[in-house]
Image (cartoon, rainbow, N blue to C red):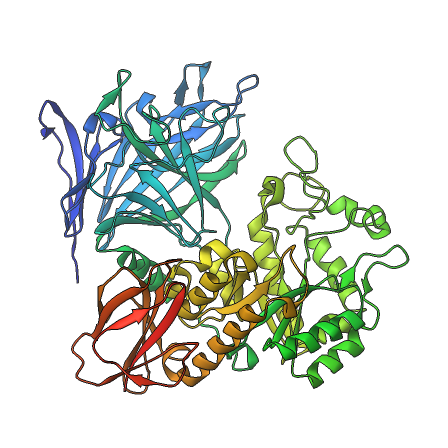
């Protein structure tokens, strides 16, 4: 076990050549963190496993920052480096900084706000926590803690990226800026915690793991990266140490969006910062370790655990649903994800599509499962129900203006009662094989509700209410139909505590990270007509259920015979090697060695005896791939198969995989 060793040094100590000051030092076998006693700035952060000086220039050190708008000055920041020296208290394994009576160059009187920031040394890294006691008239909207004045580039010969659960964005040598020039001072990109689960600032050999470990979302943290002073060439980072008289750097802030009100105290949710050595799997392993501490959920043993093919449809009546089910049966589709089956009517509050309930029984007779989509927080603002009841439940911004007339507030307890009462009138809602809940995915930036008439704190974090509401209705569905499954659209990874699985967006389905951090959870991913072959192969490699999403093209599966045939072949192969690639342990790229042309692959281990299989993809659109495959330490003979040629053949020492094709290699 790694020991935490706290070293506190008071006095003038040389930190870097040409820069000396009093310092506080936290150190264990993983890292060194050095703080400036004068202003609490983090002036050095080193990954001891690799020697990476993450914060390397002491003069760029930062402590904290908070946003507290003044009348006439919305963007009023208070920076820790501009304050009187903090009160410092040593603890057994950390440091407590306290800043009081803060100064602002835009106000003559002091800002009567006290920030107590706690940095705790853990066996793996640092834990940032604290609280803000606000005795002023200002509202503290966000607090940046930790605040890294720079994130250096560990190796300029390879890219540096920020990776999270849903995507990966470039930090070096190109910088992905996602905000217009009019909205930010510098090129900026952001990721949300805990929604995106974690952040990895990494290259292929090392990184930093950052996570706000909230089992249920209660505080939004915006992880922001700023390229200062800006681009050199379009979208490219400067390669010099200085540009236009400013030090070139990437600055990182963890912005806790707290809306700390006057005369209140707000506790800051702890945030973990841990350096690691290795590729992205080592960073994701930190998240998996934390998830193991969450309450365990019993795995649904019903149909959702099967390797089935899905399709999205929209209906107007029960006859259309039956016709879709007949077409699905012909084309190897086992589950229909259904929209349009429920609407807000003019004569009653909710209306179910004509013939929907009887259509469910016909679909079951055909062997096709039906999973309707339900949108508890999205309403039809043209309906009488909206005008008479739901217009009072709409989310509003700080000025009392609705963000989006369709979006009702999930934190309004009155809304939950209204919806449950209405749902109870319609047995068709729980009569299907399951329901998938389409959360508020934040259209028009609906992150916080400022409506003072909803009975919640103002503002209220939308995701806290979404999590509460979804969990409540998932249990409500099970109470009505114990055999039904409940799914979501993957807003939060931790929603799997009450969901039986979730639908992931198409960009996320191209990577294996979703499967890596959810090894046993049913995941469904879209197959787009335009990229069908690649999408289907990714689903095969990453153990995702594939779902045909025809979007705005032909609405008939029969129009795409080649796609349908390949889908059937994938499902057949999955069942043929089910013990490996469907029920086995997902090990991603560990345990196999592939030599030759570049390919994508994933390794699975059969639970009964540990024998392995590897699914290999050639994503090239034109060139075949030739390679050799071996399993580390294995002496077993190997066999190969593919969706097009499922009959096993002995592996002859080399493989040739055609463009946009897949092959599985299995230990006999």
Of residues 500 and 81, the one nearer the viewer is 500
Residue 153 placement: quadrant: top left
Q: Is residue 94 left or right of residue 114?
A: left
Residue 185 placement: quadrant: top left
Q: Is residue 651 left or right of residue 471?
A: left
Q: Is residue 60 left or right of residue 341?
A: left
x, y percentage for residue 441?
A: 58, 50
Determine the residue positioned at 32% across, 87% down.
Answer: 608
Of residues 116 and 243, the one nearer the viewer is 243
x, y percentage for residue 556?
A: 67, 66
Give above or below for 434 relative to 399. below
Quarter of the image with the C terminus is bottom left
Q: Can residue 215 be seen here?
A: no
Determine the residue positioned at 69% across, 39% down.
Answer: 452
Q: Can residue 63 be seen here?
A: yes
Give above or below for 513 relative to 35. below
Determine the residue positioned at 43% across, 58% down.
Answer: 510
Give above or below for 498 relative to 575. above
């Amino acid at each position: 076990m790694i020991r935490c060793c706290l070293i506190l040094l008071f006095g003038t100590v040389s930190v870097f050549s040409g820069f000396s000051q009093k310092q506080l030092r936290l150190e264990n076998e993983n890292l060194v963190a050095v703080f400036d006693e004068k202003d609490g700035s983090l002036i050095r952060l080193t990954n001891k496993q690799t020697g990476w000086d993450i914060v390397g220039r002491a003069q760029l050190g930062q402590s904290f920052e908070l946003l507290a708008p003044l009348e006439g000055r919305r963007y009023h920041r208070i920076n820790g480096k501009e304050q009187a020296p903090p009160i410092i208290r040593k603890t057994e394994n950390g440091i407590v900084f306290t800043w009081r009576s803060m100064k602002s160059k835009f106000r003559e009187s002091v800002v009567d706000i006290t920030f107590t920031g706690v940095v705790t040394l853990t066996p793996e890294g640092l834990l940032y926590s604290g609280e803000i006691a606000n005795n002023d008239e200002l509202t503290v909207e966000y607090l940046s803690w930790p605040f890294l004045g720079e994130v250096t580039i560990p190796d300029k010969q390879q890219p540096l990226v920020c990776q999270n659960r849903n995507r990966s964005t470039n930090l070096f040598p190109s910088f992905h800026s996602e905000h217009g020039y009019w909205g930010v001072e510098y090129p900026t990109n952001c990721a949300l915690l805990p929604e995106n689960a974690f952040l990895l600032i990494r290259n292929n050999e090392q990184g930093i793991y950052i996570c706000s470990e909230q089992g249920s979302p209660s505080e939004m943290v915006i992880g922001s990266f700023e390229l200062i002073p800006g681009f050199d060439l379009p979208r490219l980072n400067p390669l010099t140490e200085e540009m236009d008289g400013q030090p070139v750097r990437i600055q990182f802030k963890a912005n806790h969006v707290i809306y700390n009100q006057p005369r209140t105290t707000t506790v800051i949710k702890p945030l973990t910062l841990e350096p690691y050595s290795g590729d992205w799997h080592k960073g994701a392993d930190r998240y998996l370790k934390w998830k193991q501490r969450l309450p365990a959920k019993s795995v649904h043993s019903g149909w959702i655990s099967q390797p089935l093919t899905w399709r999205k449809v929209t209906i107007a009546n029960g006859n259309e649903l039956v016709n879709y089910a007949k077409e699905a049966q012909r084309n190897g589709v086992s589950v229909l994800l259904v929209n349009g089956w429920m609407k807000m009517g003019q004569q009653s509050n909710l209306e179910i599509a004509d013939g929907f309930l009887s259509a469910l029984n016909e679909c079951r007779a055909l062997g096709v499962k039906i999973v309707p989509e339900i949108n508890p927080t999205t309403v039809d603002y043209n309906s009488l129900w909206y005008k008479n009841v739901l217009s009072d439940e709409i989310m509003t911004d700080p000025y009392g203006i609705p963000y989006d007339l369709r979006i009702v507030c999930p934190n309004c307890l009155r809304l939950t009662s209204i919806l449950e009462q209405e749902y109870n009138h319609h047995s068709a809602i729980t009569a299907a094989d399951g329901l998938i809940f389409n959360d508020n995915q934040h259209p028009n930036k609906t992150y916080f509700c400022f409506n003072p008439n909803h009975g919640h704190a103002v503002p209220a974090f939308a995701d806290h209410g979404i999590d509460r509401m979804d969990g409540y209705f998932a249990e409500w569905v099970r109470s009505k139909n114990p055999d039904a499954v409940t799914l979501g659209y993957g807003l939060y990874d931790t929603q799997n505590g009450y969901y039986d699985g979730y639908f992931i967006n198409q960009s996320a389905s191209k990577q294996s990270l979703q499967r890596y951090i959810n090894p046993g959870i049913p995941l469904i991913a879209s197959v787009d007509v335009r990229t069908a072959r690649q999408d289907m192969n990714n689903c095969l490699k990453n153990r995702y259920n594939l779902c045909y999403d025809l979007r705005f093209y032909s609405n008939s599966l029969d129009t795409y015979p080649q796609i349908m045939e390949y889908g059937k072949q994938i499902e057949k192969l999955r069942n043929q090697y089910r013990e490996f690639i469907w029920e086995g342990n997902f090990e991603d790229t560990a345990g196999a060695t592939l030599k030759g042309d570049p390919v994508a692959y994933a390794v699975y281990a059969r639970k009964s005896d540990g024998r392995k299989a590897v699914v290999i993809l050639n994503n090239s659109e034109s060139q075949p791939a030739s390679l050799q495959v071996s399993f580390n330490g294995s002496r077993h003979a190997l066999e190969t198969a593919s969706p097009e040629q499922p009959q096993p053949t002995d592996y002859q020492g080399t493989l040739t995989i055609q463009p946009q094709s897949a092959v599985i290699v299995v230990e006999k």
